[in-house]
């Protein structure tokens, strides 16, 4: 092979940057948002993000547990 057939490190970095820039699973915030959204209806009628029912249930149980803990620890 000739030397002209090889690519430089800068060209490889630019190609990888272009490849990963278009990949939606590279952005951690988008992946987390997609994982926590409602599976059946991810957007409401206005186009706003809807959280998962499981997430809301776990958050409610956590808040209730914290309130019970504070109630009995302060009293």
Image (cartoon, rainbow, N blue to C red):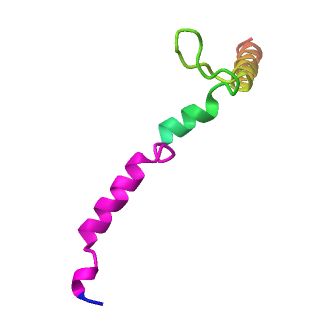
Q: Give the side of residue 27 with respect to residue 36, left or right.
A: left
Q: Quadrant location of residue 9?
A: bottom left
User: What residue sits 74% from the left and 16% below the top?
Assistant: 64
* x then y, percent, for residue 60: 72, 18
Q: Residue furthest bottom?
A: 1
* x then y, percent, for residue 38: 67, 24
* x then y, percent, for residue 5: 27, 81
Q: Give the side of residue 19 with respect to residue 12, left or right.
A: right
Q: Quadrant location of residue 40?
A: top right
From the viewer's side, name the closer residue of 33 and 23: 23
Reply yes or no: does residue 35 show up in magenta: no
User: What residue sits 49% from the left and 37% below the top?
Assistant: 29
Task: Read off the magenta span.
Answer: 3-27
User: What residue sits 63% from the left and 30% below the top?
Assistant: 36
User: What residue sits 75% from the left and 11% below the top?
Assistant: 75
**Measured along the vertical axis of the image, is residue 39 above or below residue 75?**
below
């Amino acid at each position: 092979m000739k030397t002209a057939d090889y690519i430089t490190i800068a060209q490889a970095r630019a190609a990888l940057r272009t490849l990963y820039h278009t990949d939606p699973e590279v952005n951690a915030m988008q992946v987390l948002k997609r994982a926590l959204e409602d599976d059946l209806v991810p957007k409401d009628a206005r186009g706003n993000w809807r959280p998962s029912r499981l997430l809301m249930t776990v958050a409610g149980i956590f808040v209730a547990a914290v309130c019970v803990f504070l109630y009995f620890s302060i009293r």
